[in-house]
Image (tube, rainbow, N blue to C red):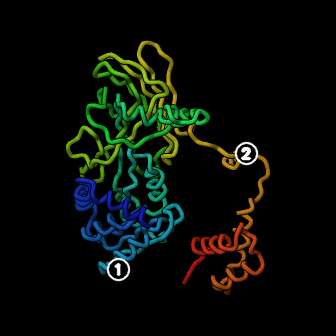
Amino acid sequence: MVGYLSEHIQYLRLPHRSDLYRAAISRSLPVGSTVADLGCGVGVLGIFCLEAGAAHVWGIDSSDAIHLAKETVRKAGLSERYTCVADTTFYTDLHEPVDALICDHIGYFGIDYGIVDMMRDAASRMLKPGGVLMPDRIRLHLAGVSSDTCLDEASAWSKDGIPDPFHWIDEQARNSKYAHDFAAEELCSDSFELGEIELSDAVSDYFSFTAELLAARACRFDGLAGWFSAHLGGGVWMTNSPLDAQSIKRSQAFFPVTEPFQVEQGDRIGIAFRARSDGQFLAWNVTPPGGAPVQKQSTWANAALAKRDLTSAGNAPIELSEKGTAFAYIVSLVDGQRTAAEIEAEVMRDRPDLMPSDQATRDFVRSVLRRYAVHD
């Protein structure tokens, strides 16, 4: 629970953020509206909606933060107007459509925290025709980077002091996205609006953009800085740009190149950027000036894939793992008659070897029942 407390207090401390959401809600949300808050956390945005005159909010979150939201709305006397749903939005059925969707799953680069897929799914199943989305579009921005700090982070695995057998991880590190708070002087090119993504039920699965950056000075080119501008509604925009005085001061994204290279003022650097709508796959190609080879990086290249990760793509027969078999056995005991305590006692009597220890078996039973059984 401590992690959620720390995460969400950081959101509330971001300058301008709460004021921007309140302004967008007041301009976009008609009084009496019903709202689904996707990935609601502790319930902040949903409560803002109620304060602005919403009739009812469904706050949906699969993390333990939902329990903080439930207690918060109870203490605030809002329980009749705010319903907490302890589940992922993709598994939630509200039974009736709402007037508006609101979501703050905006990553360092805007789309890298899953907001596109979340809004698309919810818009197709939960939103009334013509309903309101907050935000409804996100713009992506890039600039070149020359930064000793960023370079050190991307090359940390090949530094002196790291045992030689681990130096190969440098390749994984250079295919990773990093959070970084950029100072203006770390940007070595003009900033470029890479593209705009509309959030709706018709959004694509993949996005592809190209850009050409112009070097602002002679320097070592270490990679790309990425940030977002999100239209929250009613003409209200929120950004984490390191160049904007009204930024919410959230970290930006750093995308390293494989090999840093020198540029001169006025040099042109080619960029191709691809992304998947779930935010899990990002790929960036950087073309240095002067005909040097294209440098290709992607978060896919840093994924350590086990055989099980490829199962869904294969045509070979599959079978349950030991843990899957244990899961199926526990679920089979849920018959509407036994209590959770009775199921746990039966498992400990008949199959205490489901997990390596008695305590591990008890914990596994409790986690399955807590997550997948209905408790009156």
Q: Are marks 1 and 2 in contact (CB under 8 Å)?
A: no
Q: Quadrant of residue 191?
A: top left
Q: As displayed, is residue 149 above or below residue 49?
A: above
The residue indicated by pointer 1 is 74
Give the residue type at disc 2.
Gly
Report whether 16 appears left or right of 149. left
**Quadrant in which the C terminus is drawn:** bottom right
Q: Measured from the top left, where is residue 212 in percent x and y? A: 37, 24
Q: Residue at x 28, y 66 (%)?
A: 48
Report whether 130 appears left or right of 164. left
Q: As displayed, is residue 54 above or below residue 198?
A: below
Q: Considering only order in the chain, which callout, 2 or 1, is on the residue closer to the N terminus?
A: 1
Q: How many residues crowd around disc 1 within 10 Å: few (fewer than 14), some, or many (20 or more)?
A: few
Q: Measured from the top left, where is residue 204 in percent x and y? A: 49, 44
Report whether 194 appears left or right of 320. left
Q: Is residue 175 visible?
A: no
Q: Measured from the top left, where is residue 282 in percent x and y? A: 49, 39
The residue indicated by pointer 2 is 314
Q: Secondary structure at mark 2?
A: loop
Q: Residue at x 69, y 83 (%)?
A: 345
Q: How many marks?
A: 2
Can you name the residue that lies furthest to the left here?
A: 245
Q: Residue at x 24, y 68 (%)?
A: 52
Q: Measured from the top left, where is residue 32 in percent x and y? A: 29, 71
Q: Nearer the viewer, residue 238 or 28?
A: 238
Distance between the alpha carbons at the discs numbered 1 and 2: 48 Å
Residue 130: mark: none
